[in-house]
Image (spheres, rainbow, N blue to C red):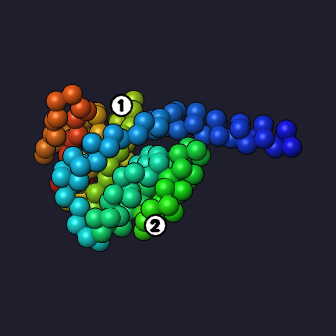
Amino acid sequence: MYLAFSITLFLFFATFIYAGISGATWMPTKKKDVERFLKLAKLKSDEVFYDIGCGNGRMVIVAAKQGAKAVGLEISLFPYLLGKLNIFLKQSSAKIKYRDLWRYNLGDADVIYFFLMPKKMKRLKTKFEQELNPGTRVISYVWPIDGWTPIKIDECEGWPKMYLYKMTKLF
């Protein structure tokens, strides 16, 4: 019994560490920023929405309420399970996948939202340039994507910035 508990505890911590190394430390988006996101994203019914590092599922649940086909990707076990529970409790059509974003193709996305650490932005930019179609909207919470020019920056005094990008061509 003690061994099983120890292994389970180790796996939880190991997934947190791996998520941090991958650039997806769990830091939930503030509730106030959900409204800012919706205004910026202009989600349409039936659009494909991804939240990379979706944590507790807050953004995918909100996107699903807007009619989007909302999918969250999470690699840390505890937030993943919490997100699954939130989706169940709110009876949402959103989905959360226990997946590593670096091994998941985002090519069908209409809108992508993420709150990742700046140390992984260069790699993420390359991934987006290889996979995303022209017209895909990308929203970065807090940090800009170096080398890209946002079409809009949402600024709210005392709150982190949100950067909206639109893929204009294949790289």
Is label 1 in contact with label 2 (beta carbons under 8 Å)?
no
The residue that mark 2 highlights is 91
- The residue sitting at 42% across, 60% down in the picture is 71
Inspect this view and state whether residue 159 appears. yes
- Which part of the image, by quadrant, shows the N terminus? top right
Q: Nearer the viewer, mark 1 or mark 2?
A: 2
Q: What element carries label 2?
A: loop
The residue that mark 1 highlights is 118
Going by the numbered disc 2, the residue's amino acid type is: Gln
Q: Nearer the viewer, residue 30 or 96?
A: 30
Q: For residue 126, what is the image quadrant? A: top left
- The residue sitting at 28% across, 64% down in the picture is 66
> If you read the primary sequence from the N terminus, does the residue marked by circle 1 or circle 2 appear first?
2
Residue 77 at x, y = what percent? Answer: 59, 46
Inspect this view and state whether residue 131 appears. no
Above or below 83: residue 157: above
- On the rendered structure, is 135 left or right of 8? left
Farthest-out residue, left: 151
- On the rendered structure, is 129 left or right of 41? right
- On the rendered structure, is 39 left or right of 71? left
Residue 50 at x, y = what percent? Answer: 37, 56
Going by the numbered disc 1, the residue's amino acid type is: Pro
State the separation of the CA atoms marked 1 and 2: 34 Å
Binning the other alpha carbons within 10 Å of mark 2 as few (below 14), some (14 to 19) or many (20 upward) gives few
- The residue sitting at 28% across, 57% down in the picture is 111
Residue 110 at x, y = what percent? Answer: 28, 61
- The residue sitting at 13% across, 46% down in the picture is 151
Q: Nearer the viewer, residue 90 or 153?
A: 90
Q: What element carries label 1?
A: helix
Above or below 123: residue 128: below
Above or below 15: residue 66: below
Binning the other alpha carbons within 10 Å of mark 1 as few (below 14), some (14 to 19) or many (20 upward) gives some
